[in-house]
Image: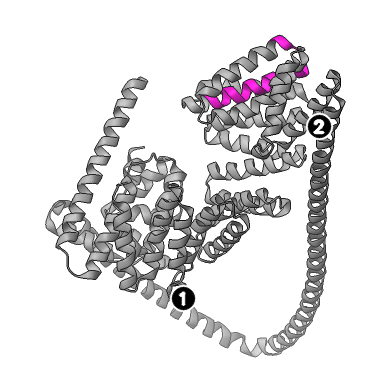
Amino acid sequence: MNKNNLLLVILITLNSFLGFSQAKIDSLQEVLAKTKVEKDRLTILDDLAKEMIRSNHPKQFQYLNDLVNLAKKLGDYDLAASRTRFIAQKYIYGGDQDSAIYVIEEMLKFKPKFTKKKSEAHLLLKRGGAYFNKELLNKAVKDYDRSADLFLESGDSIFAADARFFAGQVYTNLKDFLLAIDRLEESYVLYDKLGDQQYASYSLSELASLYGRNKFYEKAITERKKVLEQQKQIRDHSGVGITCIQLASNYQSLKEIETARKYIDSAFIRLDSVTHKIHIARIKTHGAAAYADYYLEKNDLKNAKKYLEIADKEKEFTDAPEYYNTILLLPKAVFYKTIGDYTKAEAVLKSIVARKDKINDVNSYLKAEKQLSELYAWKGDYKASHNHMQAYLSAKDSLDNEIKTNTFLFYQSQFETERKDNEIYKQESEIALLEKDKALAKSKRNVLWMLLLFVVILSVIISSVIWKQGKLKRAALAAKIEKNKAELEAYTKQLLERSKAQEVLTSEIEKLKDELGAHQSSEKLKDLTAIKILTNEDWYDFKEKFRRVYPNFFASIKNKGFQLTKAEERLIAMEKLYLDTQEIASMLAISQDSVSRSRLRLRKKINAPKGSSLLEYLEAS
């Protein structure tokens, strides 16, 4: 199928989905208009709001507000809080951070009436985002940390991981190096446990950038190589390209320019597998800029110029031309200075200095100040040269002090962690030795008691064996006869019961075969679904009944290579019976949200495409 046909199929599918979604919205609106009972209206409003959010309906804001107000009126504050976060989200996306904060704080006034911790957690997570956008970083990180704690307490690791990741980014902006590392590492662990490799790689990438900015280049390289492996596993070709270029930058910082060159080459090789035009432009722009740096190091001005021109061209096809233009400023300045075009070099260097507060790369600013100082010295303007050198030294001292502080704190943290681990190991070893000594002493006492008991018993046996021998033989023979008789009776009874059970089972199976498709068959299925799976024994009973109706279902899935856990087998069995989310939740004695999250995790695990049914995908694969 060529790209045009593929695009046509996607458009048809999208239009079909939107048409179906609109039809469902219209239907729900009609039902809502006819419903007078407020409790029923709340349920319909909730379904309607969900559908509108899913299809990004223009009236979703109105219905969300109606839903929240009715939920509060009826005392369902958890539902009100849950839907308020979507209202806040609309404000945030619209750039109205103050309104987002206002609606969240109004909802938080009802916090004592929440019955679920995650109700507060979701609101704090959204408020943290609004604070971050307003650059109120201390407030933002406080909300992110608190929401993560609440999500973890409620067992919701997905949102806890998000909150930790966002907190790590805020601590990075606050220049709190250790807390930034701590939060990003925790987010990575949480994403990794959830099997979310995409976001796990994002966490590692942020960690690598943080290490790189603080000149821990070796650690940055280690983390980026982990990211690279994860991206290769999930076939994130665009991510692989960008990570290769970032690795090249780390190796250039270590002056290992030939290794850097190999990673730049790898990024361009990966381009054949990238389909998104913007992603291609990003990789080409980053890669060409990296090549330009490489050739400038090699003093190959012809190739340096070639790749600067390629980067200039490709940046226009990215989604952020100004950002990528900033990346190109320093290599352009170096190039102009090297070829003797000092006027252009000066203009570009001044442009970098003017963007001091708008660029994340402090090293670019430092190099620009230093090169401006050298440029003015060459021109004989020693006052300007002195001013720029002072600015360079001041900024460099500030950066060096920050890096030294972070380095000291990092290694101190590592040392304290190692020392704590050693203390714990030492204490555990001492406890283990004490336990071993106790066990050995107890074992010796037991042996002595056993020896003493053995001597007593042996003495009794020896003294009585002669006169009791005949009696024991008769008693043993009688006991053996009775035992054999009891075993025979028990075994016979077991066979009879098993036979009866087999007859009933066979009869039921034959009836199902004869009556398949008839009303009685559906009644059998209703009996099957009447079991609540709460324990392993309940699951076993259910699974046996299920297998009578679908004998090859689980075996077929396993034979296709899908290794499902018991919980995933339960979920997919419910799907096979065409139960909805509420019914599945009732069967499994869990919440509807837990059912949805279980579906999402199973979908990621088996790589089922979006929009497809889990059941159809498993059976069709």
Real-space Cα separation, disc 1 to disc 2, in angstroms? 58 Å
Identify the residue shown where x is 30% and y is 47%.
58
The answer to whether 482 is drawn above or below residue 94 in the figure is: below
Image depth: mark 1 or mark 2 in front: 2
The answer to whether 283 is drawn above or below residue 103 in the figure is: above
Residue 222, position as x, y percentages in the image: 71, 38
Q: Amino acid at mark 1?
A: Pro
Q: Relative to 403, is 105 on the left or the right?
A: left
Question: Quadrant of residue 530 in the image?
Answer: bottom left
Q: Nearer the viewer, residue 305 or 612?
A: 305
Residue behind mark 1: 112
Residue behind mark 2: 388
Q: Main secondary structure of the magenta part?
A: helix
Q: Residues within 10 Å of mark 2 (few under 14, many from 20)?
A: many
Residue 229, position as x, y percentages in the image: 61, 35
In the displayed orientation, state which residue is furthest to the top: 302
